Amino acid sequence: MNPAFDLTSWLFSLARGVAAGPMEQFEIVPIVPLSFGDGLDLSFTNASLWMLISLGTALLFFTWATRRSELVPGGAQGSAEVIYEFIAKMVRDTIGEDGRRFFPYIFTLFVFVFLANLLGLLPSTPGTPAALHTFTPTSHIIVTFTLAVLSVGIVVLYGLFKHGFAFLRLFVPSGVPVWLLPLITPIEIISFLSRPVSLSVRLFANMLAGHVVIKVFAGFVAVLIVSGGVLSAISILPLIGIVGVFILEFLVAFLQAFVFAILSCIYLQDALHPAH
Amino acid sequence: MRAYLTAGASALALIGMAIAAEPVPGEEAGGLPQLDPSTYASQIFWLLLTFGALYFVMSRIFLPRLGGVIEERRNRIADDYDQAADFKRQAEEAEAGYEKALADARARAASIAAETKASIDAEIAEMEEESETRLEGEIAAAEARIAETAEKARDAVAEAARETTQAIVEALIDETPSQETVNEALSNVRSEARARAA
C-alpha cells in the first residue's frame, strides 16, 4: 500500500464519479418498485425520496420553530415568522385582502419548491448507490408542470365557482374595440394556456441548467487535474467557477421558488377579478 | 508520475466516453431522463402525496400557530401603546393637579402675608398713637409743673423784694412801711421797668 497507488486509485474513483454524464444526476432510480396493473408504475424512487426529504425538512423546521410560541421570538421562530410575513405580504400585495384563502396554498408552494431546489444542492456522498445521490425533484418538468397545472387549475376552478360564466370575461379585456376582439380573444386564450407551460419550464430549466453547469465544470476540473503540468494548475479556474455557480444556485433556488409563488399569486388574482 | 499519467489518461478516456455518449443513462428511455414518460405517474403521485401532506400540515397546524403568535404580538403591542397613552394622560392630569395645588398654595401664602402685614401695621399704629398720647400727657404735666415752679419763684422773688424793701426802708428812715405801700411802690417800679424795657 504505497501512497502513489492510493492516490491513483482515488483519482480513478474520482474520475469514475465525474465521468458520469451531466444528465445522469437527473435519472429516476426506483427504490421500492410499486407496479399496478395496466402499466401504472407508482414506484418509490429517488425523486419520491427527495420529495419526502423536503416534506420532512419542512415539518422538522416548522415543528421546531413553533415548539414554543413566544411573544419575543427566538431564531427559528423569528425566521419562520419572516417567511410567514414575507408570503403574507406577497399575497396581500398581489391578490389583495380577499386572497387570504389562498395564503396556505401559496405558502406551501413556496416552502415546497424552495426546499426541493435548495436540498438538491447538497453534495452527494461519493461511492453511494445512485438511488441515494442528491436529487432535485424540481429539475423534472413533470413535477414543475404538475405544480403549475395545480396553480392554474385552482385559478380556473375558483374563477368558475365564484364568477360562473362571467369568468370567461378574462378573455375579453374591457375597453377594447369590438372589431379587435376576434384578434384579442384568441391571444388572451393562448396566453392563458401558455401560463402553466411558462411557469413550469422556467423553474425546471433553471434547476436543470444550474446542475448541468456545475457538473460540466466539475468534469473540466477532473480532466485538467489529471492532465498534469500547466493544465493541472489551470484546473483551479473551473473550480472557482463551480464555487461561483454553486453560490449563485442558492440565490436561484430562492428566486425561482419566489417567482413560482408570485406568478401563482398573480394568476389567482385573475380568478378573483376576471375583468381586467 | 507515470502512475498519475496512467490514471489521468484513463480518467480522460472515461470522461471522454461519458461526454461523447452523454445521453447514455437515459438512452434506453430516449434522451433526457426528464422526458421519460414511464416515470411520470410515479412522480405525479408522490408529488401530490407529499405536497398534499405539506399543505394539510401547514394549513392546519403551522400557519395558524405562526399567525396566532404574530396576531397576539400585534394586539399586545397595540394594548401596550394604549396603556402607555393612558399612563401619559394620567401623568398629565397629575401634573395639572400639582400645578393647581401649587398656584393655590402660592395665593394662600400671599393672602396670609398680606393679612399678617395689615395686622402688624395696625398694631404698630396703635402703639405709636398710645405712646404719643402718653408723651403728650407727660409733656403737659411737665409744662404745668414748670409754670407752677415759675409762679412760685415769682411769688418768692416778689416776697423777697418786699421784705428787702421793708428792711431797706426801715434801715433808712427807721420806719416800717405798711405792706400795701411797699406793694404799691414795687408794682410802680415794675411797671416803670416794663415801660423802660418797652
Image (spheres, helix red, strand yellow):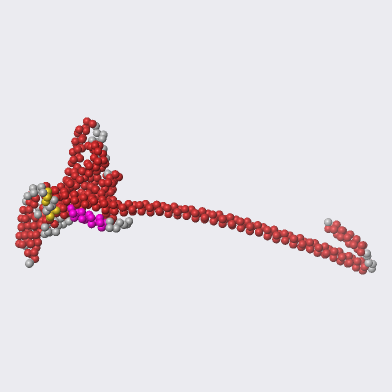
Say if the magenta span includes residue A54: yes
Residue B49 coordinates in the image, percent (x, y): 19, 51
In the rendered structure, the answer to whether residue A92 lies left or right of residue B139 reads left
Please identify the residue farthest to the top as the structure is shown. A179
Where does the image place residue A119, in percent across and percent down from the top left?
Answer: 18, 54
Looking at the image, which is closer to me, A100 or A85? A100
Residue A6 sits in quarter = bottom left
In the picture as drawn, the residue positioned furthest to the front comes out as A37
Describe residue B65's horizontal placement relative to residue A188 as left or right.
right
Judged by its main secondary structure, the magenta piece is helix
Residue at the image point whose x is 20% and y is 37% from the top: A188
Camera-nearest residue between B6 and B193: B6
Specify the quadrant of the image occupied by residue B127. bottom right
Which residue: 18% across, 41% down?
A194
For image coordinates 21% across by 52% down, the residue present is: B53
The spot of residue A65 in percent (x, y) is 27, 56
Q: Is residue A67 visible?
A: yes
Magenta stretch: residue B4 in it? Answer: no
| Numbered range of the magenta stretch | A51-65
Q: What quarter of the picture does the C terminus of chain A occupy?
A: top left
Q: Relative to A39, is B105 on the left or the right? A: right
Q: Number of callouts in the render? A: 0
- Regarding residue A224, the answer to whether it shows in the image is no
Please state which of residues B197 and A168 is positioned toward the viewer in this rendering: A168
Quadrant containing the N terminus of chain A is: bottom left
Whole-percent x and y of residue B110?
57, 55
